[in-house]
Image: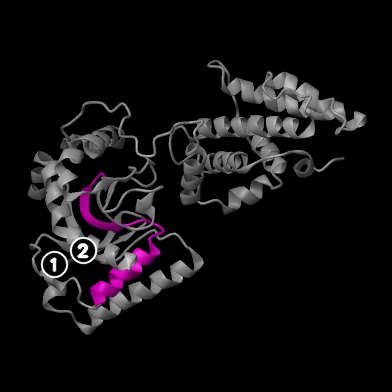
Amino acid sequence: MMTMSLFYKSDDRARNMVHLAIGLHKYRDKFDGSFEQSIYWASMSFERIIRLTASSISRDIDCQQDLKDVIDNLCNSSRVKRSQRENLRRKLTSLRLTRNSMFHPTGYINDRQVTSMLKAVSEMIGSHLETIRAEITYEQLRQFRDKVLSGRFFGYPRIPCDIDIPDREEIYDSDFNDLDVLYEKCKYLHFKRLRDFLSPLRLKPEEMSELIPTTGTIWLPWVAREPDRRTHIRTIVLGASFTPTFVRIGIDFGSEAYEAKKTYYTLLLNGNFDSQLNKLDNEYYLIDTFWFNYVSKKQPIKDYCSMKTREFKLKIKIALEETIEKAKTKTPMKGHQFLIGKIFKRGTKEFSGFLVRPPQTIRGIFSDLLDIVKHVEDHLNE
């Protein structure tokens, strides 16, 4: 029996599609629509691999034909032994029917069918479903999505500033009870309202976080450089994080911002930010987070400015060493220490004040902290 990976032909796009489909299936319980997207990309990768294979086998096969005809011609080619043709035809026809069901509104696909498709396309690219599934992280899933959607075929805007955004300007306290509602309003805030307010600061909007129920956070990141393929994941940012219980605004880092974070801790440790920090009002904090956006600790910024104790510096050194170790292993950073910013806790007077003027409040905080961000960026560019 022929080895599938030796028989089938693929390219980078097909392989990226397969990894994207498997990643979406792995995280299908994390956010709405992931299961359907997994079916779609598995089907698209299957079709691409079949057409690439047919074109590599014989010039006589018209790869622009209907997929059924391409499969028939492929199975009848001299590259396939006569004894294997019927089994191959049955297998590919079954996968083609699964693919067709995805593109019909009345079609129904169950998880067993999807798993079968994912297993097949994994083998077609010379790998195994469980191997890819075990290795792929959520951030890698996002990266594969970017690779797949970056091609001219799809015309996908990396920053969807032209997407259809409902005109929902005002954010109310009750919106924090339902993240689906809050997400739509944050989308309008991020891509529409904040553009005018932040343009004088020359900040650029990056992708909002996707709405994943298990994280319970909506992240609106802005970068001080020209965005380039999810820049915010790899550098220091100014961002606003919306959760059901509070809003945090200020400095943050992406999960792969190793160099930026090492630079930040080094400059903080050496006192390079002292002049900027001394100008901040009493509502600013040094904030520690875990699991992306959950706050584990906050300390008034004035404590750093007035004390700078040996113990305090030791903690920064430890945070720096932890970052260095994560950089060596490329371990995604899911929490950060000594982030500078403000927290507006739901139910407080400050929170009510924030809801009255969200864009103005965000701009004011970003403006206060922008020099620190630029200082880090300048050192990275040296």
The percent coordinates of residue 322 (x first, y second) are: 40, 72
**Relative to 33, 347 lies left or right:** left
Q: Residue at x 29, y 66 (%)?
A: 337
Residue with the most extreme right position: 83
Location of the N terminus by quadrant is top right
Cβ–Cβ under 8 Å for marks 2 and 1: yes
Q: Residue at x 14, y 66 (%)?
A: 300
Give the mark, 2 or 1, whose residue is nearer the N terminus: 1
Q: Residue at x 8, y 66 (%)?
A: 279
Residue with the most extreme top position: 106
- Magenta stretch: includes residue 126: no
Crowd class of label 2 (few under 14; some 14 to 19; many from 20; radius 10 Å):
many
Instruction: Tell me which amino acid carries mark 1.
Output: Gln
Residue with the mark numbered 2: 372
Magenta extent: 242-269
Q: Is residue 51 visible?
A: yes
Crowd class of label 1 (few under 14; some 14 to 19; many from 20; radius 10 Å):
few
Instruction: Tell me which amino acid carries mark 2.
Output: Ile
The percent coordinates of residue 320 (x first, y second) are: 35, 73
Q: Residue at x 63, y 25 (%)?
A: 99
Front in this rendered view, residue 98 or 66: 66
Q: How is the image coloured?
A: one colour
Mark 2 secondary-structure assignment: helix
The percent coordinates of residue 172 (x first, y second) are: 16, 35
Q: Is residue 242 visible?
A: no
Residue with the mark numbered 1: 276
